[in-house]
Every structure is written in C-alpha cells, then in structure tokens.
Image (cartoon, rainbow, N blue to C red):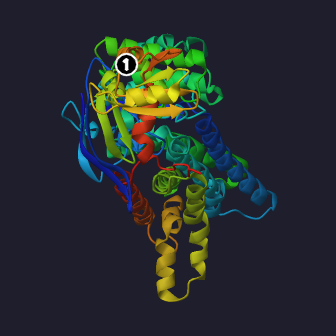
Amino acid sequence: MTGVLRSEWTKLRSVRSTGWTLLTAVSLMIGFGVLLTAVSKDMGEEVGPADALMFSLSGSPFASLAVASLGVLVISGEYRTGMIRTTLLAVPGRLRMLTAKVAVFTAVAFAVSVVASFAAFLIGQAVLGDEGIALGDPGVLRAVAGSALLITASGVFGLALGTLIRHTPGAIVAAIALIFVLPQMTNMLPGEWGATVRDHFTTNAGDQITLAEVVGGQLGPWAGFGVYCLWIATALAAAAVLLRRRDA
Amino acid sequence: MINVRSLTKRYGSTVAVDGLSFEVRRGQVTGFLGPNGAGKSTTMRMILGLDRPSEGTALIDGTPYGELRNPLRKVGALLDAKAVHGGRRACDHLLCLAQSNGIPASRVTEVLALTGLTAVARRRVGGFSLGMSQRLGIAAALLGDPEILMFDEPVNGLDPEGIMWIRTLMRDLAAEGRAVFVSSHLMSEMAQTADHLVVIGRGRLIADTGVEEFIGRSSQAYVRVRAPRLPELARVLGGTGGTAGPVEVALHGDHLRVTGLGAEAVGETAAGAGLTLHELTPVSPSLEAAYMELTQESTEYAGARA
C-alpha cells in the first residue's frame, strides 16, 4: 500500500491543476475573510465576537468549492485522458486504488485547509484590531480547525462525485449543487419536515462546526459535521461499488 | 503464458467476443488479427482486468490479472498511447507507475533511455507527437521488465522509422524468451513480425495457427500460364488428374490460372501436347490474401458488392 500511496502523491504533485486549485482555495479563504472583516470595520458598527469569527471564516464555502473541484479532477482527469486504464493496469485492485487516492488527497487538502483557515482567521482578527477575538476564546479554536475540516470534507465529497460521474463538468456541477446551491434552497421547504431536511442537508449540517456557539434548534458542531460526513460516506460507498462493477 | 478460455463479452444483445479460447506462449510473437470491430481490444481489456468478461476466464500464468501482485512486473501492456495525463511530465508519468509496483526509480531512467526519450523526459506529455507517445507507452510497458507484453495496434499512425523500431523491438523481446501478444488489423504487418497467429472475426476464433501453416491453408495458390493457344491449353490441362484434389483452370484475360497442379506438371503437360508456353509462374498467396479470404465472411461492415 505504501507504494500505491507514493504513486498517488506523485500523480497529485505532478500536474499543474493541483497547485492552481489549492492556491485559489487559499486566496478565496483569506481574501473573503479580509474583505468582510475590513468592510464591517469600515462601516463603523460594533462587531460582536460571533461575527468576528464568522466574517474571518466567510471564505470557507468558496474554498470548499475550489478544493471540491480538485477532488473531482483527481479522478475525472484520469477518466478524461484515459489515464485511469493505465492506473488500473498498475493497481488492478480498484478499492485499493480509490483508498490510496482518497488518503493522499485528504492529507494534502487538510494540510492546505489548515493553513488557509488559520491564516484567514488571524489576518481577519488583525484587521478588526480591538474588536478581534482570540483562538483561546470559547469554541474559537474548534471553529477555525472545523473550517479546515469542512473544506477537506468537501474536497472528499468532490472526489466521490468525480468517481461516480467520471465526467469533469458533470461532477463539478453536482459538487456546486450539493455543496453550495441546494443547501440554500432547502430554506424554502415548508413545515417541520422542511426544517429537518434543511438542518441535515450537506453543508447546512457541516457548517455548524465553523460556528463558536450552537444557534437555537440546529445540530451541534460535531453532530452537524458528522451528518455531513455521512453524506460524503454515502457518495463514496456508491462510488466504490460502481468503480468495482463498471468496465474501466 | 496467457490462457484464454471461452471468453465472452456481451453488451446488451450485442456479442463483442464470443467464446474465444487460445493461448499466448513465451518466446514468440503471437499476432492477434482481425478486422476493425472484431473484438481484439475488448479481448485484451478483459485479459488485463479492465473489462469484466460476461463468461469465461483469462489467466496470466494461472492467475487472473486482477489478483496479480505488482502486475507491471509480470505483464507490460500498451493499449492506447494517448491514454496519459497530458499535463504530466514523461518522467513523472513513469515514476508514479514504478512506485505503485515497487519498481526502483532508477528503472525509469533506464526505460527512458531504452525508448530514446531521455531528452524529453521533463517535457509534459500533452505536447508529444504520436510517435513519442507510443514510445512512452512502450517505456511504461517495459518498466517492470515483464515476461509478457501486450500491444494493441502499436504501429497505427507511426512513420516508417517508428514502425521498424517497434517491429525490431517485438522480435527482440520474443527472442529474449518473453511472450509478445500484439494485435493488428493489418495482415501485412503481422507477416513481418509474428510467429503465430490468432485470427478472429466478429468475436469468434477463425484460426489459431503458425504463420506458415496459415498461408499454406489458403486455397489461393495457383500457376499463372500464358500461351498463344489458350483455349486448347485449358482443355488439355483440365483433362489431367491433379496430384492433390481436382484441377481447376480459369481464364483471366490473357492468361490462365491453374489451381491444383504444380508449375512442373503444367509445363510437362503442355510439352506433351506440343503447346508453346509464354509464361509459367507459380503464384503463392500473400498473407494478406489468405487473411482476406478467411475474414471476408466476418467483417462487420462488408461493402455491398455491385
């Protein structure tokens, strides 16, 4: 397995799209954080601790999409070019191949997300100056680390969707829909069941881990993130079954 | 050794490969021949575990490809030279394959040199010409120093120099005792390189034989005869008893085509009848002709005859 992991690392580092998408993710994360904190400070209104945290991490949905796109590309790029067949000739155990891909991608995505999240938080708080909060404040460290987890998980979601759909544009559209568009649309669902669907829908649940305190009625930070991981695990399991069954 | 038994692949109601059985042995080049759409690539993909057979088995030294540990050290395959990520450098492409099979990185440098790609090792493969891509694919196939090599239409689109290079390489690999299995839809190509032929049409086995036997089996060997008094000669020749099977004499414009009788016998018969000959030529069928004759029935899109 070590060899397969090293092989996937070589693949990931040797294409330019990896660097570009990760750089985009970091820029979006820090850029939005700085922009929102600077604008809110400029408005001269008092920024509360919850807002100070939220503003500085406001880039996380966009960083999530960038990392999810890379997740898609990691496998759909192989299908587009036909490289997948070469890959499967070298590693015919398809689950072994997928496991290695997920492991290497997760490690890289997490490393970058941690840097991006902490940088966005620290720069954001520096912009806010006196109104800024500290990592030591209650729930803050968990929220900032949680932002890194959320971005990484979204990346794995993209990888699962890429394996399922095998087609770059289709998988990226699916990722944008599931991570960004549909979660917001669930607000329009009526009644109690609508609220339940909304609270449990992908990033609506996952986002909870980036908040310092639980908003009334919502899932807790870890429960919410757990629900998001369940969505991803389901997509990944479906992808694994199809990967095994389909002709390459 | 590759051992294919009753291999079948169905796509819905279409049968792409139909109960195919054959073996590929070490120390020789086995040509896998058939018209386009005959099921050659599908068969190769099933042998390599990429496609799942509907029925039957394909074994590499008794083991399905999917269960081989470090398969690149056992089987090297080139299916599609363009099936590489264009954004990756040639050396990185080979390195990731080597790492996955526990092959030392130094071997990457070796196969790059072997295939003449050292100078472009750090170039991104998207910019490679077809000939260079083909060399890269062969470098990947040779990476694990495998005993079995499979090439799917390796000379397609190559210039004469590239074709010569691949032919020589395949001959050399077989001479080293490796099993070389190479597909083509061109008989003329196989005539130059193969020792043994597996011919398929519409997914079915048509012939599994040595190249010499394959030519010999064809009925198209004939003697071409030109003479001033053709009708008379035809009558005389038609009356002789053939050594093997019936003698057939057909008039083709200014000459006769005699089958079932050797050139010597034709000459002696004519001399016996006091007839002058202007030409007496034994014509052996080309491998191409033998192949055309065999696969005529099975081409997928046979042109309508006017």
Lateral position of residue B171 relative to residue B277, left or right = left
> Is A108 drawn above or below residue B304 in the view shown?
above
Residue B277 seen in render: yes
Judge left or right: residue A179 versus residue B287.
right
Q: Nearer the viewer, residue A170 or A74?
A: A170
Q: Is residue B140 visible?
A: no
Look at the picture and state if B168 lies above or below B246: above
Quick one: label 1, few (<14), some, or many (20+) residues within 10 Å?
Answer: some
From the viewer's side, name the closer residue of A221 and A51: A221
- Figure quadrant of the N terminus of chain B: top left
Q: Judge left or right: residue B27 versus residue A18.
A: left
Furthest-bottom residue in view? A191
Residue B232 horizontal/vertical position (percent): 47, 28
Where is residue B286 shown, x and y percent of the image? 45, 25
The part of the image, by quadrant, that contains residue B64 is top left
**Residue A237: horizontal and vertical position, in percent?**
36, 58
Vertical placement of B105 versus A79: above or below? above
Provide the chain ID for the residue under circle 1.
Answer: B
Q: Secondary structure at mark 1?
A: helix
Residue pointed to by mark 1: B269
The residue sitting at 45% across, 36% down in the picture is B292
Amino acid on which disc 1 is placed:
Thr
Front residue of A139/B198: it is: B198
Front-lying residue, A132 or A204: A204
The number of numbered discs placed on residues in the rendered structure image is: 1
Q: Residue B17: x, y in percent? A: 35, 48
Q: Which residue shows up at 53% across the image and 68% down it? A: A204
